[in-house]
Image: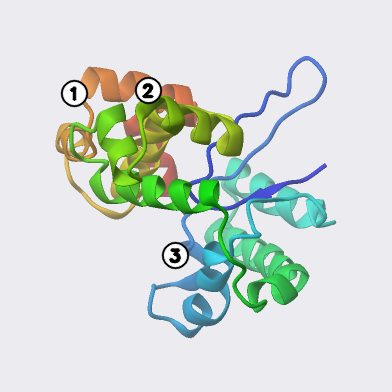
C-alpha cells in the first residue's frame, strides 16, 4: 500500500503491530529545483494547489518509493540523484492521474470549505504569532465552537493541532534550507521556546530538529 499526501495536510498513521510503516517527507524544491522553474510552474505547483489532491492512494509506484527510501537509508553513492529521480517519477505519475481534476473548472465552494480556506490562510500567514482559537475563528467571522466543528468535520483534527503541525513543517523547511540557529527558528515559527519546540517536533517528525537538519543535509 502506498499513499501520497499533499503539503500542509494534517495526518497520522501507525504501522505496528500490523505492518511496517515507511515515509519520506520532502520539499517540492527537491523535485522542482526552484519555485520559478518550469517544472515547478507546470507540474509541481498545480498539484499542490489542486483542491482535489489531499491523499492519493491509487498509484502503483511502491518500487520507486522503496528505491528512494533504500538509497537514502543506505547512503549509497549518488543517493541524492537516485532519490530525486524516483520522487520525480512518482510525482509525474501522480500528475498524470490528477490532470483532469487539476485543469477542471473551479467549483463553487461550500460554506464549510470557504470558512476553512479563510482559517487555513490565517494559520499559514500568522503561524509565527501567538495565535489563539479566537483569532482563527475570527478570520472566518464565526465563533469558536463553529471553528472547532469545521476543523473536526473537514480535517478530523483541531485548530490547535493543525497549527502545531504547520509550525513543525514550516520549521522543517527552515532547518533544511537555512543555517539559522534552532532557537531562532523555534521562536520565529511560533513556539514558546526551544525545549517545547524540540518536544513537538520529535512527536511530528520522529526526530529532533538537529537530527532532521543533519539528515536533510545529506540529500
Q: Secondary structure at mark 1?
A: loop
Q: Left or right: where does residue 99 sit relative to residue 174?
A: right
Identity of the residue drawn at 18% across and 31% down: 130
The residue tagged 3 is: 29
The location of residue 218, given as percent across then percent down, is 44, 50
Where, by quadrant of the figure, is residue 172 drawn? Answer: top left
In the picture of the structure, the residue carrying the numbered disc 2 is: 200
Cα–Cα gap, marks 1 and 3: 29 Å
**As drawn, 153 above or below 36:** above
For the residues labelled 1 and 2, the Cα–Cα distance comes to: 11 Å
Tell me if residue 82 comes above or below residue 214 in the rendering.
below
Splitting the image into 4 quarters, where does residue 61 fall?
bottom right
The crowd level at tag 3 (other Cα within 10 Å; few <14, some 14-19, many 20+) is few
Q: Earlier in the sequence, mark 1 or mark 3?
A: 3
Q: Position of residue 180 (x, y in %)?
A: 17, 45
Nearest to viewer (mark 1 / mark 3) = 1
At which x and y percent is residue 96?
A: 75, 74
Q: Residue furthest bottom?
A: 38
Q: Earlier in the sequence, mark 3 or mark 2?
A: 3
Q: Quadrant of the N terminus?
A: top right
Residue holding disc 1:
192
Amino acid at each position: 500500500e502506498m499513499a501520497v499526501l499533499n503539503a500542509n495536510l494534517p495526518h497520522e498513521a501507525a504501522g505496528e503491530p500490523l505492518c511496517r510503516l515507511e515515509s519520506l517527507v520532502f520539499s517540492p524544491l527537491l523535485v522542482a529545483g526552484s519555485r520559478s522553474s518550469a517544472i515547478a510552474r507546470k507540474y509541481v505547483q498545480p498539484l499542490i494547489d489542486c483542491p482535489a489532491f489531499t491523499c492519493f492512494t491509487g498509484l502503483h509506484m511502491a518500487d520507486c518509493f522503496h528505491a528512494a527510501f533504500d538509497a537514502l537509508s543506505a547512503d549509497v553513492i549518488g543517493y541524492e540523484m537516485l532519490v530525486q529521480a524516483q520522487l520525480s517519477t512518482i510525482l509525474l505519475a501522480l500528475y498524470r492521474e490528477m490532470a483532469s481534476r487539476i485543469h477542471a473548472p473551479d467549483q463553487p465552494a461550500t460554506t464549510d470549505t470557504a470558512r476553512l480556506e479563510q482559517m487555513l490562510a490565517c494559520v499559514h500567514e500568522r503561524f509565527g504569532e501567538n495565535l489563539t482559537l479566537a483569532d482563527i475563528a475570527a478570520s472566518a467571522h464565526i465563533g469558536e465552537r463553529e471553528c472547532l466543528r469545521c476543523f473536526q468535520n473537514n480535517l478530523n483534527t483541531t485548530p490547535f493541532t493543525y497549527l502545531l503541525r504547520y509550525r513543525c513543517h514550516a520549521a522543517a523547511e527552515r532547518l533544511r534550507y537555512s543555517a539559522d540557529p534552532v532557537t531562532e527558528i523555534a521562536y520565529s515559527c511560533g513556539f514558546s521556546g526551544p525545549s517545547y519546540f524540540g518536544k513537538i517536533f520529535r512527536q511530528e517528525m520522529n526526530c529532533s530538529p538537529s537530527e532532521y537538519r543533519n539528515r536533510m543535509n545529506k540529500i
